[in-house]
Image (tube, helix red, strand yellow):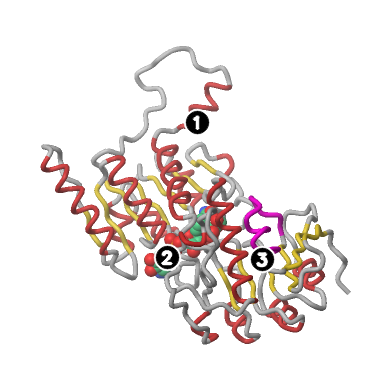
Amino acid sequence: MAKPVQIEVWNPNGKYRVVSTKSMPGTRWINLLIQQDCRLEICTEKKTILSVDDILALIGDRCDGVIGQLTEDWGETLFSALSKAGGKAFSNMAVGYNNVDVEAANKYGVAVGNTPGVLTETTAELAASLSLAAARRIVEADEFMRAGKYEGWLPHLFVGNLLKGQTVGVIGAGRIGSAYARMMVEGFKMNLIYYDLYQSTRLEKFVTAYGQFLKANGEQPVTWKRASSMEEVLREADVISLHPILDKTTYHLVNKERLALMKKEAILVNCSRGPVIDEVALVEHLRENPMFRVGLDVFEDEPYMKPGLADMKNAVVVPHIASASKWTREGMATLAALNVLGKIKGYPIWSNPNSVEPFLNENAAPPAACPSIVNSKALGLPVSKL
Ligand SMILES: NC(=O)c1ccc[n+]([C@@H]2O[C@H](COP(=O)([O-])OP(=O)(O)OC[C@H]3O[C@@H](n4cnc5c(N)ncnc54)[C@H](O)[C@@H]3O)[C@@H](O)[C@H]2O)c1
Ligand SMILES: O=C(O)[C@H](O)CO
């Protein structure tokens, strides 16, 4: 028997019971649920990561839908319990859903939502920040100042890398990877090389047009190249940022052999998922190549780092905060709540999950649709005509 967990209840007499495994930023998501006759229960347990047993206790005997987090293990046990409790919908408050066994959700007919689009720019901005922090050794220099070691300007003090004119490499040029590429190309006049399973025509057009603009103004034009292999990106780029989804094909995508292909002074940034890099191999590479730098937002065994990483001066590490801007986190909460609400109300699925702006307008009612359900096709759910 699962132990009870602490909750806060909104709209106790609501017809539909919705559970959120965490308190989430903003109040719009709460208001949208309670205005549509939901009783909302928000878990207030102090522990950061809830266990499967904790979530089973939250689901209980009757539950219409759950809003959950990327730290939770949503598999057979939870989907079977949710379905038994009458639940039709689960949404991650995240775009990535590698913590969810979608096959299990399909088996129990549970719709799985995610939150694309609203975090694209925020995440890309953090990847750009980590690129700059690593290139210009900002964390090392900050520690040096605070330690009272600064005795005056010196020609060799914290010399780093100039980005202008160098090549930025993007692996996984989807929403976030493309947004990051544009920031680095436009902001720092870097040339682009990218690798993705699909061609990113919009990104290519953007770099071409920007290159033409620079040329017309007497400046060196920027260029782009779609690499035919990931290795090509690793060999040629000066700064490489990882933005693929995490699945079987991207697990340890960057390993010992591939690290060895990179330039000795290259910068590697990861704002995707930790297991995309073999972190043990990375620590060894950082140790052997002091001019090689990394900026990491995610870790293989989150919340832990592999032994030795914390001691590396050539690593900038932050705790999975890439989507952490107020607007974005409130938007993620709204999209996750609307995924669950929409399914409970029997709404169709929004036709373009890359364009979720209509759901984020605080001054208007959201469309009567689920913003993004990743298994909508498998479940045969109807698509909205709005
Ligand atoms: N650190 C964070 O806080 C944070 C925030 C948002 C997203 N993310 C992660 O970023 C991921 C990407 O988000 P997105 O919105 O850009 O998704 P997206 O689906 O738009 O982009 C992912 C891209 O990866 C490509 N891809 C898939 N497998 C590949 C492979 N084997 N090799 C190369 N490319 C491959 C896809 O074709 C796609 O273009 C999410 O799945 C999530 O895990 C992390
Ligand atoms: O996948 C995601 O959305 C992130 O990791 C958290 O924003």
Which labelled disc corresponds to residue 140? 1
Instruction: Choose between 115 and 143: the one closer to the eye.
Output: 115
Q: Is mark 2 within 8 Å of ligand 1?
A: yes
The kind of residue on which mark 3 rests is: Ile
Figure quadrant of residue 87: bottom right
Q: CA distance from mark 3 to mark 2?
A: 20 Å
Image quadrant in which the N terminus is located = bottom right
Which labelled disc corresponds to residue 67? 3
Q: CA distance from mark 2 to mark 1?
A: 38 Å
Q: Residue at x 72, y 62 (%)?
A: 21
Q: Residue at x 19, y 54 (%)?
A: 208
Residue topped by disc 2: 354
Q: Quadrant of ligand 2?
A: bottom right
Q: Position of residue 275 (x, y in %)?
A: 53, 61
Q: Position of residue 385 (x, y in %)?
A: 43, 77
Element on which disc 3 rests: strand
Please state if 5 lies on the left or on the right of 86 as rendered. Answer: right
Q: Is residue 83 above or below residue 24?
A: below
User: Is residue 78 something one can see in this rendering?
Assistant: yes
Please state if 372 lies on the left or on the right of 219 as rendered. Answer: right
Q: Is residue 35 above or below residue 370?
A: above
Would you say residue 371 sits in the magenta stretch?
no
Element on which disc 2 rests: loop
The kind of residue on which mark 1 rests is: Glu
Please state if 156 lies on the left or on the right of 348 as rendered. Answer: left
Q: Earlier in the sequence, mark 2 or mark 1?
A: 1
- The reply to whether the C-beta atoms of the residues labelled 3 and 1 are less than 8 Å apart is no
Please state if 67 lies on the left or on the right of 215 as rendered. Answer: right
Q: Position of residue 175 (x, y in %)?
A: 40, 60
Figure quadrant of residue 155: top left
Instruction: Please report the bounds of the magenta region as a residue range.
Output: 22-35
